[in-house]
Image (spheres, helix red, strand yellow):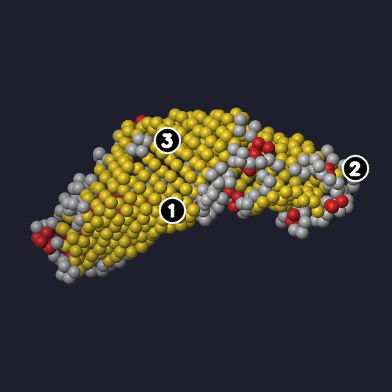
Amino acid sequence: MAARLIRIVLASLLALAILLVGGASLALLAFNPNAFKSVLIGAVGQRYHRQLVLTGRLQLRLFPPFTLQTGPMRLSATDGHTPFAQATDMRLHLDPLALLRRRVVIDGIELDAPRLQLRRDAAGKWNFSDLLTAPTSAVPSLAIHSLSVHGGDIALSDDTQDLDGRLSGVDAEASGIGLSGWHAVSLRGRAVLSKPSADTQFNLRGQLHVDPDGTASLRNLLLRSDGSLLGGARMLANLHADLHWTPPPSRSLQVRNLQLRTQGRMHDGQPLQIQVTEPLLDWSDTWTRASVLQAQALIGAAPATLRVRLRGGPVNGPGADLVVSALHLDVERAGPRPLDLRLRLGAHLNLPAGSAIIDSVDGHGAWGLPAHAWQAHGQGSYGAEQGLELKLQGAFAGAPMRVDARCDMKHWQLQAQAWGGALQARGAVPRGGRQATLHATLQHASLSQMLQTLFGAAAMDGNADLQADLAWNPTGGQAWYQGAGSLSAKVHGGHLLGVDLRGAPITGDAASAPARTQPSSAFTQLDAELAVTPGLARLRELQLRTAHGNWAGSGSVDLASQRLNLWLHPAAAAGHATQPADWLNIGGTPASPRFAWQASAPADPASAPGYKPK
């Protein structure tokens, strides 16, 4: 992303310099710049269909050596009125001996506080593309040896890449333009983007070599950024590489010795480290060659650090049918919730069309304590219009598994066999400030299998129908449990494990309750509805029907820590009138609940059965 922004900035600044210097050269040759001011403005309007405004006088100064100073300038877009560029001043340091030979040689161009509006439409055309075309024969031969920009401000909008933002405080230095050999180049500033989200300081340094045909090489490239980037709240990134670019018609790009290292913290405060190495990438319109790609990421703090490793290549083939024989992805976590995931992918890529046929996906893994193993294989495809589609089948926790998934730039949907039931889910992809959403239903599933998978233990069993409707903003660093929405569950023919509700006295002190020796309580139906607010799920309603009576419930669940604070109370016990009775508090976690009886209502009225939140 940063390299593409820098490429756009350099191209636009060079285009602006070519326009102004090329037009001004007519005046310089006569050594009377202001006599040709109207000619320059007219030439810009006729050649580029843009309005050029020079509010000051053009001045030719001997000190600094032979410098043309234009003063404030404004340049419109091709419609003649939309602002494109302006600067408080531009100074051209000239070679006087070259002027006598009817050549304009610029030893240096300085722009003070330039302001540019750069836009690319849906057809892929930039609003400065016309400035890069060859000048007319009326313009004398032109050479520019250096470019210097101080305090620039550049607004960016790219409809083809969903890019929107601004570069501020831009300082740029480029020497040796048009000369043989290697010369220093630098670019620094601040990038604040809304799409994709980023707010970072950047600094680029390297050595540039440009041939007369437009072929450009950049060696010893060092790009450093510091700020909000790559999904992190504070990230420090360093990129090293050597680049070689050949312009059309034989367009190609070579990247050698690429190394990317970044570290910092994500929006939730968890540490993040990323490292990528690619010794060789050689791309053209017709052929692609790459060596072995190695990438690694460490997410989160010990002991729950998530380690992600990616390895691919080498590949060598035509861009329209590039075969990737094996791409390996390993995900591991050794902490309190162990995870071991291994994926291998083979595909045929069509780079010009931006599509792929996924020939094979093979994976296996395990997570949780005790470990829940799964394995799957399948095929899929990817295209710019239809997005990613995958069809997998295999086994999960010893039961057959089948998954059909689809995801495009805006939405995703999933159909699967899970926990013995049917899972259907859909949602929105959070891009450009949009919220992430989840709408999911799970029917006829084994509640004990699901709880075992999610928490490593099951305190309930039964046949469950579940529904979830949630929305949250992950671009602001929110996890799903920091969103809002609702959860509901219906469970038939199950057991509440670890407590015997039949032992609860209908009247009297909890201490006088008979001994509870039964390990579980059977129920015919459980109905629950929860309202989700950031970090908390509060029961709107809970009804538990048993052969010995019905129970009502209330309370809340802390979603981040998974701590329970639930209460049960007899609603209509069989053979008894409704009267004061014991309260059952359920604490702990879903994996390890704790039960406690007490004779009085909970101190928090919001935890009492029948409480209706406003």
In the image, what residue occupies the spot 66% across and 41% down?
Answer: 457
In the image, what residue occupies the spot 52% across and 39% down?
Answer: 340
Q: Are marks 3 and 1 in contact (CB under 8 Å)?
A: no
In the depicted view, which residue is nearer to us: 571 or 338?
Answer: 338
In the image, what residue occupies the spot 45% across and 46% down?
Answer: 297
Compare marks 1 and 2 and give the one earlier in the sequence: 1
Q: Is residue 359 left or right of residue 367?
A: left
In percent of width and height, residue 493 lies at: 75, 35
In the depicted view, which residue is nearer to us: 226 or 88?
Answer: 226
Which corner quadrant of the image does residue 452 belong to?
A: top right
Q: Is residue 595 left or right of residue 534?
A: right
User: Would you name the residue on which mark 3 appears?
Assistant: 327
In the depicted view, which residue is nearer to us: 18 or 267?
Answer: 267
Q: Which mark is residue 112?
A: none
Whole-angstrom CA distance, mark 3 to mark 2, is 66 Å
User: Would you name the residue on which mark 2 appears?
Assistant: 575
Q: Name the front one of labels 3 and 2.
A: 3
Residue kind at label 1, given as amino acid type:
Gln
Q: Is residue 165 left or right of residue 185?
A: right
Whole-angstrom CA distance, mark 3 to mark 1, is 25 Å
- Secondary structure at badge 3 equals strand
User: Would you name the residue on which mark 1 appears?
Assistant: 263
In the image, what residue occupies the spot 33% across and 38% down?
Answer: 291
Label 3 Cα neighbours within 10 Å, binned few <14 / some 14-19 / many ≥20: some
In percent of width and height, residue 22 lies at: 20, 56
Compare marks 3 and 1 and give the one earlier in the sequence: 1
Placement of 249 over or under 37, stated as above or below: above
Whole-angstrom CA distance, mark 1 to mark 2, is 66 Å
- Secondary structure at badge 1 equals strand
Compare marks 3 and 2 and give the one earlier in the sequence: 3
**From where the camera sits, is residue 583 visible?**
yes
Residue kind at label 2, given as amino acid type:
Gly
